[in-house]
Image (spheres, rainbow, N blue to C red):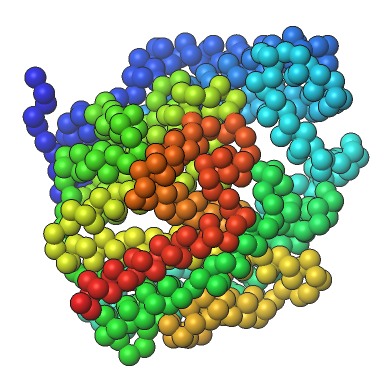
Amino acid sequence: MPEVDTFRPEPGTLRTRDEIPDKYKWDLGSICPDWDEWTAAYKRLEVAVDAFPAFQGTLAAGPDQLLAAFRAMDDMGALSYRVWYFAALHYDEDQRDNDINARRQQVQILFARQQQSSSWFNPELLAIPFETIRGWLDARADLSMYRFAIDSLFHEQEHVLDKDGERLLSYAGRFNSVPHDSYAALTTADMKFPSITLSTGEHVTLSYGQYRAILETNRHQEDRAAAYRTFHGAYAGNQNTYAALYNGVLQRDWFHARARNYVSTLDAALHGNNIPPAVVENLIAVTRQGVEPLRRYHRLRRRVLGVDTYKLFDVFVPLVEHDVRYPYDEVGAWIVESVAPLGPEYQREVRRSLEERWIDVFENAGKRHGAYSAPVYGAHPYMLLNYNETLDAVFTLAHEIGHSMHTLLAHRTQPFVYAGYTIFVAEVPSTLNEALFLDFMLERATSRAERTLLLQHAIDSIAGTFYTQVLFADFELQAHRLVEQDRPVTAETLNEAFRTLIRDYYGDAIDDEAVSAVTWARIPHFFSTPYYVYQYATCFASTARLMQDLRASDPARRDDAVARYLSLLRAGGSDYPMTLLARAGVDLSRPDTVHAVCAELDALVERLEKELLG
Ligand SMILES: [Zn+2]
């Protein structure tokens, strides 16, 4: 008998986990049948960790020994996925559970031991002459599977120093996190969130969440302005401290780049994934030439919102009020239908993910916030959602299923060593699923309001995930170049750089607001992970390029695009990301790949203009 009971979340009520029917909760039994089995798996991992140092000193003895060590490492790695995720996913169901938290921490402690017991491996492998290893790889089919893993290790090795140099760098390593730690303390623990009084008389403390909520939902411009000015004002009040901390980040990056003989900080950041700096430079240059659709969108918004001045605090508020709710029981079938262009096999797997309890759908008391897809090697991907029936929530589901299909196909095709993929390709399948879902929804939308809502969703995601991230990458590159050219870094130089960027990207489509110049101070990525955000933009460009072929009218071109795309997903991490994308037909060093996003935005804005202006 099929389960007939259905469930819908009610805004304002928080359920306990027991109140939610099982079919909306993930079934972790594919990872481990129960906690006894988990304990047994944990013990097996412990034994493997303790046994691994026995391989130390053997690698140079020959291909058999090297292969044995690689296989032992893979077995240990595969087992650690099950051990970690069974505890971690259980914990996320209800983070108030101390017993499960203790087990999760127990795994973290074992992982630290695992790292120690295998830390000798890379240096010992790298000490073997590359020519010797190459000979082994050519002679032995079973070992040649590890060719790319070994090649990329030697590639990284190009900038490793001699023993004294590495020792010195390891001492300096202790300072590396100081700028970010200080930034984190200043923006969280020590942050005094300012408060404002809204036009309704309501008093609001501007935490980041509250600030975003006002910008995204409040229809009174003076409230949005007050929130924006007060929120940025809090950063402006400490701008010299933020500038000093950011200078610390920049100086550290330049120190490491020079110490390791890179010509620039950008080269140093991209070397590991073997990405040419021209990719980032091309991304920025082409985007700067392609800002017109972005400005066109904002001019349309200014007109539709009917405001005299239009500023950065006016860019998020919805253009129409349209409160549709999307019950979870209905959207699954839509998502399955939306991926039809990718073929029946892909579609079948998407249906399985929805029907076989891979997803933990609704919020419950104690559950972790947000959404993710967990790549559980040896089982199948699991997804955590906090589904609340909004359009955002539906797109989040489509997004996470994209990640999960990538994981599923990569794990199924690749040996363990290449099953994972880098962030450089990770956001391609997720954003591609969103793009397919948008096409499907636009086709079936019956009202002007719903089409407007969908178009705004798609446009905002291009504006936020592409243009804003490129602007940020542009800023990071300029800031790093200041130190590379021995020029001073002060709050005023950083503000001036940011102010100019806003003008370069938005032109006169958005009116000046003095305090916007300090925006750089509130972007945590600048302080935690320099040269990271551009990857959101390159993923977006890759997706836009792939979608051009998937939407083509010529069926042969479409079939070819599907085949290339699915091989990209199956390829996992078996080569450098640029190589994998090139095989799928995406060349990120070419201007037209980046231009695909600008063209897509232009088409969407044109449709939106038609909906709103007739
Ligand atoms: Zn994602």
Q: Is residue 190 visible?
A: no
In the image, 192: left or right of 164? left
In the image, 395: left or right of 290? left
Q: Position of residue 362 (x, y in %)?
A: 24, 41
Residue at the spot x=24%, y=29% of the render? 355
Residue at the spot x=33%, y=90% of the render? 308
- Which is nearer the eye, 40 or 375? 375
Residue at the spot x=46%, y=76% of the render? 292
In the image, 6: left or right of 129? left
Q: Residue furthest bottom?
A: 308
In the image, residue 65 sits, relative to residue 248, either above or below, namely above
Q: Position of residue 85 (x, y in %)?
A: 44, 28
Q: Is residue 539 visible?
A: yes
In the image, 495: left or right of 379? right
The quarter of the rendered structure image containing the C terminus is bottom left
In the image, residue 21 sits, relative to residue 432, either above or below, namely above
In the image, residue 583 sits, relative to residue 5, either above or below, namely below
- Which is nearer the eye, 293 or 434? 293
Image-quadrant location for residue 476: bottom right
In the image, residue 71 sits, relative to residue 190, either above or below, namely above
Count of number-bearing discs: 0
Q: Position of residue 158 (x, y in %)?
A: 82, 40
The quarter of the rendered structure image containing the N terminus is top left
Q: Position of residue 252 (x, y in %)?
A: 75, 57
Residue at the spot x=44%, y=39% of the render? 560
